[in-house]
Amino acid sequence: MTALETSLLDSLSPWRDAPAWYVALSGGLDSTVLLHLLARLRERQALPPLFAIHVHHGLQAVADAWPAHCQAFCDQLGVPLHIERVQVDNGASLERAAREARYLAFEHRLEEGGLLLTAQHRDDQAETLLFRLLRGAGVRGLAGMPTSRRLGRGWLARPLLQVSRAELEAYAYEQGLSWVEDPSNADTGLARNFLRREVLPLLAQHWPQAGASLARTAAHMREADQLLAELAVVDLAAIRADHAHIWLDLPSLELAPLRHFSEVRQRNLLRHWLAPFTRMPDSEHWAGWSSLRDAAVDAVPLWRLEGGELRRADERLWWLSGDWLEPPPEPPVWTNPQQAQSLLGNGRVVLQGAAPSGPLRLCYRQGGEVMALAGRGHRDLKRLLNERAVPAFVRGRLPLLYRGDELIAVANLPGLDGPPSAEWRFCWQPPTNAQGLS
């Protein structure tokens, strides 16, 4: 077994029991070599079923011939090929949109525990590090591409990150392989191509091990990023997550303990906590966090991020996205209070127990509402919400139940959600965030 084959098998040892291996086959040199290596290895090793996936973006006329090339190569190897045709959204970054469409296609193909293999190599890692360094990336960005990560129901692995492009090219010529060339890779007007074709070769003339050294630095940065993540986990454990409004089912943090951390430690914790929800901004835009944290007590500050908003209410941080970012339209007529009623953009309501008699209607707060309470007389709704510390961003969408012109219940708030006899309760299931939280 060659050193290249041994290195590849060692990289893939954690996934030898996966239900299937899928190679992302573009038709280029790197993925062609990866698929060829695996097809040869399965003749001598007990490997999971092997498949290839080619994603056709339709962005270049020349690319129309690539699916047929990939099909012929897979037929030669006896590897089933899935060809996925995707639509790429036009936007500020066509490259990013194409990548997102490609990985969405991969996700849809992967079954539970399945493994997608991509062919990025050591030179790609060096290029990524240099590219991000010139963009002013932090530790996480300079960690480069991880060797593996979750992808949908399965995993993504990059088993060639310790292998140079020269080694892959030598293997391809030795085996007589053919591959396609993407003409856009020759455009040095694109930043990555300029680094790959102009800068890195120039560095290698003076520092022959430049590519390997840069890739090694990325590995060091991955270790540092892991340590920062572990520190964030420890810090998060020290912050109380429970509160009186658990029914909101929104990500939130207590602010007071966070204030005791240094500025850099606060940012580290927030990057870790918000990572599943949004991309974080560059250093210049972290002033939004300082403004939110230091705003006056009676202020209603927010920090807008790419995936949503971070709000401050009653000394807690709340993450909002999806339906929470827009005020809901007026509630519909509740024709049958015995059944749950969906609220457009605002979850749904349900009556638990026997519905109260009389004509019932749903409303949202407009201001000036008054509610009659047993033993307390009539009380302003605003005061009642203040007593229960209902966050400001919730008040305008908290469902109210009227019988005629009388406010008889406020959803989910004990003492206000139904009569003292508890013969019925007015309950609200709020909307979820856009990231699939429930």
Image (cartoon, rainbow, N blue to C red):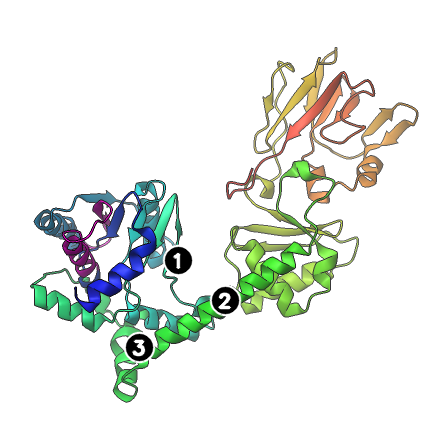
Q: Position of residue 24 (x, y in %)?
A: 25, 52
Front tag of 3 and 1: 3
Quadrant in the rendering for residue 162: bottom left
Q: Residue at x 23, y 64 (%)?
A: 6
List x then y, in percent, for residue 259: 72, 62
Tag 1 or tag 3, which sits nearer the N-term?
1
Residue at disc 1, secondary structure: loop
Callout 1 amino acid: Ala
Q: Indicate left or right for 281 with 76 as reference.
A: right
Residue nearest the observer in this picture, 57 or 145: 145
- Ranked by sequence position, the earlier of labels 2 and 1 is 1
Quarter of the N terminus within the rendering: bottom left
As measured in the structure, the alpha-carbon distance from the residue carrying label 3 to the one carrying label 1 is 30 Å
Q: Amino acid at mark 3?
A: Gly
Q: Residues within 10 Å of mark 3 (few under 14, many from 20)?
A: many
In magenta, the rendered stretch is 31-60
Q: Residue 211, labelled with which disc? A: 3
Residue 20 x/y as whole percent: 27, 44
Is any atom of residue 288 visible in this view? yes
Depth check, front residue: 412 or 32: 32
Residue pointed to by mark 1? 92
> Image quarter for residue 109?
top left
